[in-house]
Image (cartoon, helix red, strand yellow):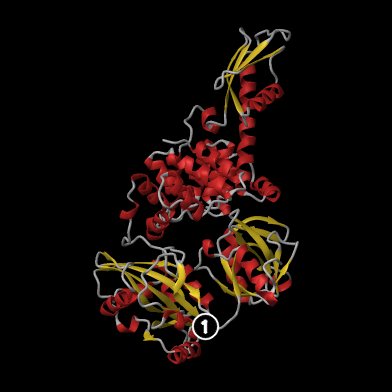
């Protein structure tokens, strides 16, 4: 059983490295030394993930719950927590500072208690005292009984962040200390150090909490963890609780670390992860050499196959020849797992949204199969028969209460276009034409997305016009012989839609509005992903394209994601992607990306996309260079 401190020390080292390769090396070495149980947990922890999507467990811990638990554990007020947040901007550092202060208080109280117990013992000040470190056996002599400052200097010399006096003997004028880093407050109280498995078990208890007392249960368990942790452990417990590790290692980095730790090809690790979405399971399989045995499994979501933007209808058909042509629906992607009468629905982000979509569940039950995994699009249809705004669909996906009432107001129609698994067999390696034939056999015709096979541009252009006239985005042009490639974006699926360059950017901050919009978060700070460091770099703000109704919905969505507030501005936990249109990309020293968007406008809230799908700094630079024929040297 591995101590959680070892994991925290790993994270500290990784966070301090700027080189991606060095980060991967550190993670790989750590994973290679874990037992199987800890390996399955810690591999996901490094990514900032606690539970895989198949588990149905969700932490449900926002900043407010985290700060309440921290305040209770460390005997400080929410106001003090808020003040530290304004200074650091990092919940992890706030947790570390709070626990460190409490440890210092406990040490002083303990030393005072020892002194009171021996108050009647005469100790001449000119007698030498010896202080010994129980761990390293290092000793230091003092001409008098060491003061608190003497002990602080000695602990700094030893490289410890804090120490505990475990023995004081006035008769022999000796004192023995031990590093508190290795066990946190638990050691001070005589308890055992936290382990990775214990932290994971507490997180499971938090995720399982439900009902009216759920918040108090979550706070109670977090409070326990903080009360047992050292300052370093507290830093990463806090970040894990809100699933925001800030160490610059994402899915790709952990994939490479697993491959390196167990000498497996990166491609095998990536395929196994795309089929299971459980890096812990993948790591254990990599250790045993059984990656090839991981495959599509019912009720375990897999990454969805993605489309690449085509260069136009004629060019796309010239490249593919005869192609499968479908409408590109203006809806939200869904992956449906049907097992008998049980249906589970996962969003594009692979979140379980079954409870929010009862009408889609009823539609899926019409599929004539004992078991199936289906790929499709849920489209909100208005009274005029046209698709409703994407934001209306997101209301359905996020709704937890009065679900049927909202379903009546915003009805969803299911369009199925692919079949991934059928009656116990994976279909991912079959060509699209075969998968389509099986889909036609089992799906009700009313649920099937129309598909036409043709190599003629005029036919594709007519379908494209029909899709736009109906209010949808455009068309998909697919290679009929293509296999289903989870998580892959390539030329086998091409999307054709009206040209309007947009960027998918992560919302990392916001600013409260003024006047009649003072109660709303009125503008939003955006960030792009730097693949070299794994960090989000800001690229500007967007406020255009937002109605009062949209601002109200967004404020409600983001209120539990506020990490820290500084005046009118707030820092948000990175969790949501905005699709943003703009007139031009400009160089700018005002933002950490080095670029800014001229006249940005919100097109869509892409709550269906994961952070890994956000646009990168590399793409921003590429688009900047393309503008007005700029050369690659600009």
* Residue 534 in picture, x, y percent from top left: 58, 55
For this rendering, which residue is in front, 221 or 463? 463
Residue with the most extreme right position: 589
Q: The N terminus appears in which quarter of the rendering?
A: top left
For this rendering, which residue is in front, 423 or 399? 423
Answer whether residue 406 is visible to the viewer in this image.
Answer: no
Mark 1 — residue?
A: 312
For this rendering, which residue is in front, 567 or 425? 425
Q: Residue at x 58, y 53 (%)?
A: 64
Using the image, determine if residue 567 lies above or below residue 186.
Answer: below
Using the image, determine if residue 487 lies above or below residue 602.
Answer: above
The crowd level at tag 1 (other Cα within 10 Å; few <14, some 14-19, many 20+) is some
* Residue 221 in picture, x, y percent from top left: 48, 44
For this rendering, which residue is in front, 155 or 231? 155
* Residue 150 in picture, x, y percent from top left: 70, 21
* Residue 470 in picture, x, y percent from top left: 48, 89
Q: Is residue 475 left or right of residue 554?
A: left
Rendered image quadrant of residue 360: bottom left
Q: How many marks?
A: 1
Q: Callout 1: helix, strand or loop?
A: loop
Q: Is residue 437 left or right of residue 188?
A: left
Q: Residue at x 34, y 81 (%)?
A: 448
Answer whether residue 140 is visible to the viewer in this image.
Answer: yes
Rendered image quadrant of residue 72: top right
Using the image, determine if residue 555 lies above or below residue 599.
Answer: above
């Amino acid at each position: 059983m591995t101590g959680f401190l070892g994991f925290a020390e790993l994270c500290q080292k990784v966070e301090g490295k700027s080189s991606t390769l060095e980060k991967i090396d550190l993670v790989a070495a750590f994973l290679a030394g874990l037992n199987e149980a800890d390996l399955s947990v810690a591999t996901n922890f490094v990514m900032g993930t606690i539970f895989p999507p198949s588990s149905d467990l969700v932490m449900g811990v926002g900043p407010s719950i985290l700060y309440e638990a921290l305040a209770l554990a460390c005997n400080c007020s929410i106001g003090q927590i808020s003040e530290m947040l304004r200074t650091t901007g990092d919940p992890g550092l706030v947790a570390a500072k709070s626990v460190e202060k409490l440890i210092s208080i406990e040490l002083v109280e303990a030393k005072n208690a020892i002194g009171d117990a021996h108050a009647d013992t005469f100790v001449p000040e000119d007698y030498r005292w010896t202080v010994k470190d129980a761990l390293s056996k290092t000793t230091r002599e003092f001409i008098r009984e060491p003061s608190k400052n003497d002990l602080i200097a000695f602990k700094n010399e030893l490289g410890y962040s804090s120490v505990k006096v475990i023995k004081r003997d006035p008769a022999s004028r000796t004192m023995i200390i031990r590093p508190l880093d290795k066990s946190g407050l638990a050691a001070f109280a005589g308890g055992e150090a936290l382990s990775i498995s214990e932290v994971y078990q507490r997180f499971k208890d938090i995720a399982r909490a439900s009902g009216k007392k759920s918040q108090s249960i979550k706070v109670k368990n977090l409070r326990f963890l903080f009360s047992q942790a050292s300052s370093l452990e507290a830093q990463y417990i806090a970040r894990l609780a809100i699933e925001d590790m800030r160490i610059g290692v994402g899915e790709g980095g952990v994939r490479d670390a697993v491959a390196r730790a167990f000498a497996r090809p990166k491609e095998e690790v990536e395929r196994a992860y795309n089929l299971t979405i459980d890096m812990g399971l993948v790591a254990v399989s990599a250790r045993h050499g059984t990656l090839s045995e991981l495959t599509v499994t019912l009720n375990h979501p897999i990454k969805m196959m993605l489309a690449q933007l085509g260069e136009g209808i004629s060019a796309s058909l010239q490249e593919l020849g005869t192609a499968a042509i479908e409408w590109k629906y203006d809806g939200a992607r869904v992956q449906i797992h049907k097992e008998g009468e049980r249906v589970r629905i996962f969003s594009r982000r692979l979140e379980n949204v079954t409870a929010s979509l009862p009408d889609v569940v009823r539609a899926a039950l019409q599929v004539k199969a004992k078991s199936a995994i289906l790929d499709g699009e849920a489209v909100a249809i208005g009274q005029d028969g046209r698709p409703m705004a994407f934001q209306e669909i997101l209301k359905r996906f996020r709704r937890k209460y009065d679900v049927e009432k909202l379903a009546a107001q915003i009805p969803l129609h299911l369009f199925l276009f692919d079949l991934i698994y059928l009656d116990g067999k994976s279909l991912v390696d079959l060509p699209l034409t075969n998968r389509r034939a099986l889909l036609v056999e089992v799906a009700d015709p009313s649920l099937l997305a129309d598909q036409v096979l043709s190599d003629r541009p005029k036919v594709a252009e007519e379908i494209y016009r029909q899709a736009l006239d109906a209010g949808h985005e455009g068309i998909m042009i697919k290679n009929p012989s293509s296999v289903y490639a989870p998580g892959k974006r390539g030329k086998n699926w091409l999307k054709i839609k009206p040209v309007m360059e947009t960027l998918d950017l992560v919302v990392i901050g916001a600013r409260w509005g003024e006047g009649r919009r003072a109660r709303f978060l009125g503008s939003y700070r955006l960030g792009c992903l730097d693949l070299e460091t794994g960090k989000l770099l800001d690229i500007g703000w967007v406020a255009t394209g937002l109605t009062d109704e949209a601002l109200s919905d967004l404020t409600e969505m983001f209120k539990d994601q506020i990490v820290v507030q500084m005046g009118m501005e707030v820092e948000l936990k990175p969790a949501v992607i905005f699709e943003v249109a703009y007139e031009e990309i400009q160089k700018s020293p005002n933002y950490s990306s080095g670029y800014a968007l001229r006249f940005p406008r919100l097109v869509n809230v892409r709550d269906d996309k994961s952070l890994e799908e956000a646009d990168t700094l590399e793409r921003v630079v590429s688009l900047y260079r393309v503008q007005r024929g700029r050369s690659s040297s600009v």
